[in-house]
Amino acid sequence: MTEKRTPSVTTYMIVCALLIVLTVLTVTVSFFDLPGIWHVVLGLCIAAVKGALVVVFFMHALISSRVTWIVIAVACFWLCLLLMLGLTDYFTRGLVPFMTGH
């Protein structure tokens, strides 16, 4: 049986500090006057990084089996598909100027 190495307390503290910095960055970006959809893009990118840090370190996916990584990959694929379809609808609503219901 193989022994799995767990992250040290220092690693947890560094990841926690990164999560706090990314949260402050999210709040800071929200005050900038960015053109178009860049608020959404930056917010989702920062959220994806924060979510990845939480899954990899705090949920111990780093030391998990391959099956866990396959489940994480499939879940990320479906989440990306869901976000892409929803955002495609949201960002293309104004492209048909005289459609009824707008």
Image (cartoon, rainbow, N blue to C red):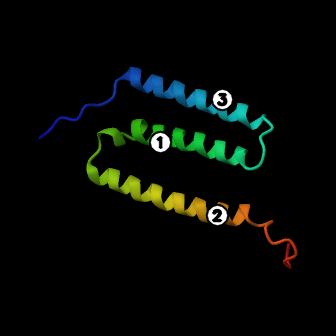
The location of residue 32, given as percent across then percent down, is 78, 34
Mark 3 or 2, which is nearer the eye? 2
Identify the residue under disc 3. 24
Which residue is outermost to the bottom? 100
Q: CA distance from mark 2 to mark 1?
A: 21 Å
For the point 73% across and 50% down, which residue is it?
37
Identify the residue under disc 1. 52
Query: What element does badge 2 sit on?
Result: helix
84 and 36: which one is in front?
A: 36
The location of residue 9, given as percent across then percent down, is 38, 22
Residue 39 has which mark? none
Q: Which comes before the other along the chain, label 1 or label 3?
A: 3
Identify the residue under disc 2. 86
Query: What element does badge 3 sit on?
Result: helix
Report whether 35 appears left or right of 52: right
Q: Quadrant of residue 42?
A: top right
The location of residue 85, given as percent across then percent down, is 61, 65
28 and 17: which one is in front?
A: 28
- Amino acid, disc 1: Ala
- Amino acid, disc 2: Gly
Q: Are marks 2 and 1 in contact (CB under 8 Å)?
A: no
Query: What element does badge 1 sit on?
Result: helix
Q: Which comes before the other along the chain, label 3 or label 2?
A: 3
| Quadrant where the image shows the C terminus | bottom right
- Amino acid, disc 3: Val
For the point 29% across and 44% down, which residue is it?
64
Report whether 73 appears left or right of 45: left
Q: Which comes before the other along the chain, label 2 or label 1?
A: 1
The location of residue 88, given as percent across then percent down, is 66, 64
